[in-house]
Each structure stands twice: as structure tokens, then as C-alpha cells.
Image: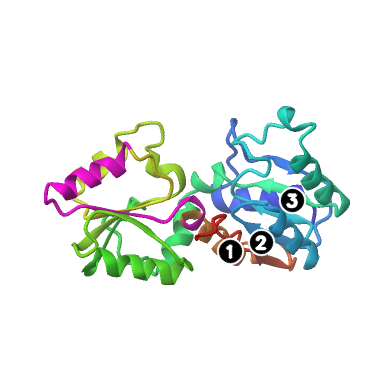
């Protein structure tokens, strides 16, 4: 099976074969006709992820996010950059193809990034509304306890919160990745929290003057609002973890492995 055949099976399974005309889901390296020896799914094709793929004999990496540091993997500014050149050399020397699976994954019949996170949390039966992935009704707990649960399930040592850690909560919103920035509408996360009477919003990325400020002011006014920040990578990695499971039966026995990108941060 070659790279294009793997891509076609994925798009057929997720989107019924539908393809977006404008998309960042393109090959960042390699070519469509390459025969695949093994597949790695991951949030981002970092140098360590590439080395792990090489070690296990996989030559196709399916990454959710860019490989070369900008949203569209633009290369013009990198032609004499030592980091890019060293990474490119590693990829080319080992014949690695890298395909980005982002837009179609979010726009599939169900958003498979959310699907993976919710499966990891075991919240599949806790949706506020069957039509949406953002709202969940959980057993009453505290913000502190919910943060501890997320740390345990998502493999985090440190977690950020805004608001009162001891506030009681049960109506939980989730905006993964950049969704917590509003997807082009800065007010969207605040409107969602208000209109759906959410106690806590679990976020990927944040801007400190939008939802962060809204929740902070609400808490200062004595309102039962809080925010838990897990970051872009920790909120989206799980879609790629569980992709390895649903991909295996589609690729004719090719070995498929998930490699955790892990948070880029070191906490001192």
C-alpha cells in the first residue's frame, strides 16, 4: 500500500471520500507513490517523534499539526535556517513521508480530535447535547478535583486554572486546540459559557484578555465560573492516539503505532 492509498482510505472512512478544496492536509515530505512500511500517528512530527518512527521502522508519519513551524508549512523563509536544514536532512536520509491530517479530521462526520479526547476521559455518555462535542454534564465535583482528574488522565504534572479551585462544578465545556481562541470570533467562548450556563471551560490555547479575563472577573464577582487550561497539545493529542486504533483495519495489516509528542514545556 502506498502513501496515497493510505490517505484515500482515511478520507473515505472519515468524510465519505469528500475532499476540501482549500486545506492544509498535504504532504510535508515524501511523495504519494511511496510504499508504506509502517505508520505513526502523532500530534506533531517533532524530531523525537521522527526518531521514534525510524526506530520502529515506520516511514509514514501522520501528524495533526505542522512540521515546519508555521500553519501552512511555508518554506521560503527557512531555506538557510539551520534548524530546518537539520530536520529536513533527518527526514530525507531515512525516507520519511509526513502527511498532515488536520482539516479533514476536524470536519469529519464527527470531529475525531474531540472523539479521541472524550474517549480518553470516558465522557462519551455525558454530553449535554448529542449534536455537539463541547458540552458535558458530569457528577458534581470541585474545580480542584476536576483538575486532578485531568492531570491523571492526560498525563500532566502541572495544570493552570482561573477562578476558585474549590468552586463546585458539573456543567463542563471543552474547546480543544485553538478553538478556545474563538475560531475567528473572540467573543465565542464567553458567549458559549454564558448561553449554556457552564461552570468550567476546559481550554487548549488562551489569550489572557478574552475568556481568561471574563472568567477571572466572573470569579471576582462571586459567580461560579472557572477555566482549566490544558494547552493545545494535551487537548488534541488524544485524537491522534485513538486514530491508531481505527486506522489499523483500514491499511491491510500495516503496523500502526501512536507516538506521543508530549508537551514542549519544562516546568521549573
Is residue 178 shown left or right of residue 186? right
| Magenta stretch encompasses residue 219 | yes
Under circle 3, the secondary element is helix
Within 10 angstroms of label 1, few (less than 14), some, or many (20 or more) residues?
few
| Magenta stretch encompasses residue 223 | yes
- In the image, the segment drawn in magenta is 209-234
Marks 3 and 1, how far apart in space? Answer: 16 Å
Which one is in front, 45 or 243? 45
- In which quadrant of the rendered view does residue 25 lie? top right
Under circle 2, the secondary element is helix
Q: Which residue is mark 2?
A: 250
Where is 29 relative to 201, above or below? above
Tell me where residue 136 appears, x and y as whole percent: 29, 59
Q: Which residue is mark 1?
A: 246
Q: Which residue is mark 3?
A: 5
Tell me where residue 201 appears, x and y as whole percent: 30, 52
- Marks 2 and 3, the one that precedes in the sequence: 3
| Applied colour scheme | rainbow
Residue drawn at x 76%, y 60% as measured from the top left: 51
Residue drawn at x 48%, y 68% as measured from the top left: 155
Residue drawn at x 30%, y 64% as measured from the top left: 126
Is residue 137 shown left or right of residue 95? left
Residue 139 visible from this viewpoint:
yes
> Residue extending furthest top?
76
Amino acid at each position: 500500500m502506498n502513501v496515497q492509498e493510505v490517505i484515500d482510505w482515511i478520507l473515505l472512512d472519515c468524510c465519505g471520500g469528500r475532499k476540501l478544496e482549500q486545506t492544509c492536509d498535504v504532504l510535508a515530505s515524501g511523495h504519494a507513490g511511496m510504499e508504506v512500511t509502517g505508520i505513526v500517528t502523532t500530534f506533531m512530527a517533532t524530531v523525537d517523534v521522527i526518531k521514534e518512527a525510524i526506530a520502529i521502522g515506520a516511514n509514514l508519519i501522520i501528524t495533526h499539526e505542522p512540521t515546519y513551524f508555521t500553519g501552512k508549512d511555508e518554506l521560503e523563509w527557512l531555506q538557510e535556517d539551520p534548524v530546518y536544514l537539520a530536520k529536513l536532512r533527518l527526514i530525507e536520509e531515512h525516507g520519511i513521508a509526513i502527511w498532515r491530517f488536520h482539516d479533514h479530521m476536524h470536519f469529519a462526520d464527527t470531529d475525531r480530535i474531540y472523539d479521541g479526547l472524550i474517549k480518553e476521559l470516558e465522557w462519551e455518555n455525558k454530553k449535554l447535547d448529542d449534536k455537539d462535542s463541547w458540552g458535558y454534564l458530569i457528577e458534581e465535583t470541585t474545580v480542584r478535583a476536576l483538575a486532578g482528574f485531568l492531570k491523571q488522565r492526560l498525563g500532566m504534572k502541572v495544570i493552570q486554572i482561573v477562578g476558585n479551585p474549590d468552586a463546585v462544578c458539573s456543567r463542563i465545556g471543552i474547546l480543544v486546540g485553538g478553538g478556545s481562541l474563538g475560531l475567528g470570533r473572540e467573543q465565542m467562548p464567553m458567549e458559549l459559557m454564558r448561553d449554556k450556563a457552564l461552570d468550567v471551560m476546559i481550554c487548549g490555547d488562551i489569550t489572557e484578555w478574552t475568556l481568561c479575563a471574563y472568567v477571572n472577573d466572573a470569579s471576582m464577582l462571586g459567580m461560579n465560573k472557572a477555566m482549566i487550561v490544558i494547552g493545545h497539545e494535551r487537548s488534541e493529542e488524544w485524537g491522534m492516539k485513538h486514530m491508531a486504533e481505527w486506522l489499523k483495519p483500514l491499511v491491510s495489516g500495516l503496523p500502526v503505532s501512536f507516538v506521543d509528542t508530549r508537551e514542549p514545556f519544562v516546568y521549573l
